[in-house]
Image (spheres, coloured by chain):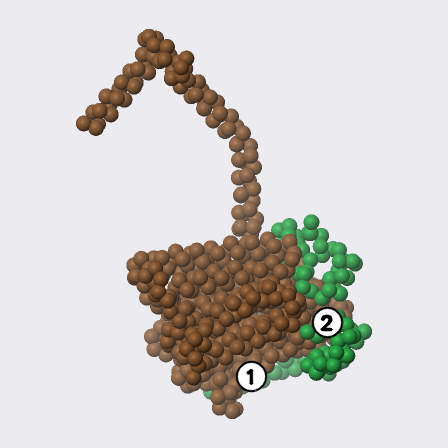
Chain colours: A green, B brown
Amino acid sequence: MSNDTTPPARDTSGRFVKSAAEKVNAMSRTPDDGIHPMSRVLFGWTEKKGIGGIIFWGMAALSVILVLLDLVVPRHEKIGIANAVGFYALWGFGAFSFVVLMGWPLGKLLRRDENYYGDLSGPPADIDPAIADRLNAGEPKAFEGEE
Amino acid sequence: MMPAWLAALNPGWLMILVGIAALFISHRQIRQVLTVGTPIAAIALLVMAPHEVDLLTAEALDITFSFYRVDSLNFIFGLAFLIASLLNAIYALHTNNPRQDGMALAYAGAAVSASFAGDLMTLFIFWELTAITSVFLVLQAGTRAAYFASMRYLVIQILSGVILLDGLSYVWRYNGSLSIEAFQSFSDPGAIYIFIALGIKAAFPFMHNWLQDSYPKASVVGAVVLSAFTTKLAVYGFARLFPGFDALIWIGAIMTIFPVFFAVIENDLRRVLAYSLNNQVGFMICAIGVGAAGIGNPLALNGASAHAFAHIIYKALLFMSMGAVLYRTGTTKASELGGLYRSMPWTTLFCIIGGLSISAFPLFSGFVAKSLTMSAVAYEGVSDAGMVVVWLMLLFASAGVLEHSGIKIPYFAFFGHDSGKRVKEAPFNMLLAMGMAAFLCIAVGLPAIIPGFGYQWLYSLLPYPVEASSYQPFTLEHILTQMQLLILATFAFILLKRFALYPAEKPGTILDTDWFYRKAGYGFVQWSGTVWGKMGPAMSTIFTRLAERTFKRLESAFSPRGEIARGGLSGGASIWTAVILAAVLLLSFLSS
């Protein structure tokens, strides 16, 4: 089907399905600078100055509001403990923090060298041929484990 | 009305036959028409198939084989498998690999055929076929690591099949029938063997590592295909054969928890998804275990089935998005990625939709599916304190899912530290497949503004549709509590990042239970080899000398030059004559 290595001859093949597919593909094509036009539409807001602070305080405010809503929304939990105000909020916050913070000791305990089992290989054979060529030519590091 | 032969055509068999044919079709377009068209035809066949009827049977060796039997439980699993197969075929359209295309179709077909099996022997045959066909998807990666991983994968998958065969032999021996019926307890003949066989494929704790070992080493397309079938076939097997088994509740709950910790320290994002798969299957296994009498049973089995359906789609979507990243950048290591939203905005968007779905945000498929399980467990918790612990474990795991699949995957691949990688967006066919999966994730998760659509469509497919129709996932308190859990967990992420408490992504190998066979076991075998290498010659010398000596003794007695032949009562000859006489006397005494 349509991929980015399509030879130009396919554009003039005249077949309707193929040309439609090519058009859609062209709409989603990344220009040479690697910045896709849609990225500005969809995620341009993440690059705005001060967005980190807005997200932080926005989420903090949202969290407080959600907990306060517990006071007005009647709940009929089957499990008694879940009826406590802010139970889900506390459990979610606590569980998430615990899991992430456990990453420090667990990482030290369980992380070994990348080639620990002696079978470190490069990427699979079906990656973009252009990338595979570049990796083979310029970055042999990924293939150190190969014989 | 369908003709009888068409009604008896198992959609799985159709996929297997076309899959095998595709192996030999070198013309790319023809093969692709088949790989996309066959799942569509198979879905049509399944939708039209009558339920609760043996549509294809055979008698052989005193066994009644039921090859194709559709009911409300296997219908939803079969449908999910077929939809996944269609998405996989579209996702693979940019490739030109007959072996991968054929095996992917046959693998999906084997999973579908196994889920429609009406007897254990048919289940076993297709169970094994899923193993044999799927191993090629790992092998297609073409790397050294994939080769070794595929061999380990095959050994474990075949082991599961052998144990299943063992179990069904017991069933046959004691029951005289192989028809698929739920076991009543572990003391039933063969139950424990079949439980273990299914447990291996469902990747139970300590049996799970074949999954994290092989899936992330598979080809770009292969990992997407693999994510859908094997584990969910095992989930179906448990729902069919072991509903309400208490052991499953705890096994499932543990399964939801432990992968969360591995996922947080794992650097390879496809491996993170493999751990996430474990965690999600845990929810389903737990739900199947909650099969107590009363409302628990239908609600829980509905939960497991709905979760399996939703999970097959969103997990495929997440694997597809990581596959697209791998395809364009050559890596899925979090430490080498970041900032890809600039180049791959569509892939980013679809990945986020997959992440929101698996995290069970309201308006996405995970929410309406997981709610059933959580409610079923909570209902049991009213009368059983142990179930409160299970419920808390599942809630803990829900926050864990958000960590690794909802935040870690999209954040470290597409946002976070900019890796400077500027690549092309994924090929159109990949985007199309991801878009379709994302559409399903949302379509199934929406409230039923139009009756029969949104979540109600999914609920109408469940094993107990009447009970499902009375369940309301979109209540104010349910939405509120779920948002509290997820938003506060997300806020924890923001806080931890802000104060640099979130562990950095580092390259490395994370030790897991495969260490026992890949290092300890392998080391033991190597050590045994060394020991044998040294002991062998020494032992050979001893044996050779012993044999030489024995031969010389015998020769000196019995050979033509030996003492007996020479005659006369020399010392040696007299002893041998006495021995032979004693033997003859003893024989005649015993035989008289």
Q: Secondary structure at mark 1?
A: helix
Task: Report the residue marked by disc 2.
Answer: B339
Residue type at mark 1 is Ala
Asked if badge 2 and badge 1 are on a common chain, one would say yes
Q: Name which quarter of the figure residue B178 lies in.
A: bottom left
Sequence-first tag of 2 and 1: 2
* Residue B113 at x, y percent in the picture: 46, 69
Q: Is residue B72 visible?
A: no
- Closer-to-camera residue (B470/B116): B116
Residue B109's place in the image compared with B139, above or below, is below
Assign the N terminus of chain B to one quadrant of the image: bottom left
Badge 1: chain ID = B
x, y percent for residue B532:
53, 35
Q: Report the residue at 69% width, 76% height from top.
A: B428
Q: Are marks 2 and 1 in contact (CB under 8 Å)?
A: no
Q: Where residue B485 sits in the image (x, y, percent)?
A: 54, 77
Q: Amino acid at mark 2?
A: Gly
Q: CA distance from mark 2 to mark 1?
A: 29 Å
Look at the picture and state if A120 lies above or below B364: above
- Residue B72's quadrant in the figure? bottom left
Chain to which the residue tagged by mark 2 belongs? B
Q: Give the camera-side residue of B17 and B209.
A: B17
- Residue corresponding to mark 1: B443
Residue B312 at x, y = what percent? 53, 72
Of B134 and B200, nearer the camera is: B134
